[in-house]
Image (spheres, helix red, strand yellow):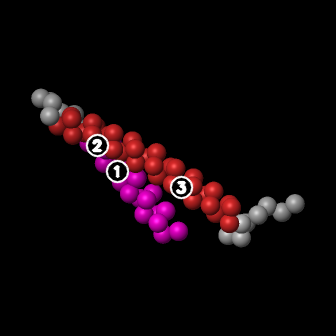
Amino acid sequence: MATPRPDRDPSEARRRKLQRDTLTGFVSFFAAVALLQAVINVTRPEPEVWPAVLALVLVLAAVWLWRSGRRR
C-alpha cells in the first residue's frame, strides 16, 4: 500500500498545519513568560543577563515559526 503524499492528501496538509500552529503557540507562550521574567529582572538591584537572552531567543523562534507558517 502506497503512503499518501502530503501535497495530494488534504487531511495530511491540514494535520501538518495544526502541528505547526500548536508548536507556534507553545513557543509563543514561553516567549511571553520569558519576556515577562526579563522585564521583572530589570527591576532587581543586580539584574542577570540570561533572562534577556532566553527571551530574545524564544521571541525570535516564535516570530520565525509564525512567519514560516504564514508563507505556506
- Choose the circle earlier in sequence order: 3 or 2: 3
Q: CA distance from mark 1 to mark 3?
A: 16 Å
The residue lying toward the viewer, choosing from 48 and 30, is: 30
Q: State the extent of the magenta-drawn residues as a range.
A: 52-72
Badge nearest the viewer, 1 or 3? 3
Q: Residue drawn at (57%, 53%), measured in percent from left and top?
A: 19
Question: Please, what secondary structure does the residue beneath circle 2 have?
Answer: helix
State the image coordinates of residue 66 (x, y, percent, origin top left).
43, 59
Residue on which disc 2 sits: 35
Say which label, 1 or 2, has the lower sequence index: 2
Q: Which mark is residue 59?
A: 1
Residue beneath disc 3: 20
Residue 72 placement, left or right of 34: right
Marks 3 and 2 sit apart, C-alpha to C-alpha, by: 22 Å
Residue 40 colored magenta? Answer: no
Residue 2: image quadrant is: bottom right
Kind of residue sitting beneath label 3 = Arg
Left-right relation of 60 to 21: left
Circle 3: element type: helix
Please tell me which residue is depicted at 18% across the width and 33% down the height of the picture: 47
Give yes or no for contact between labels 1 and 3 (Cβ–Cβ under 8 Å): no
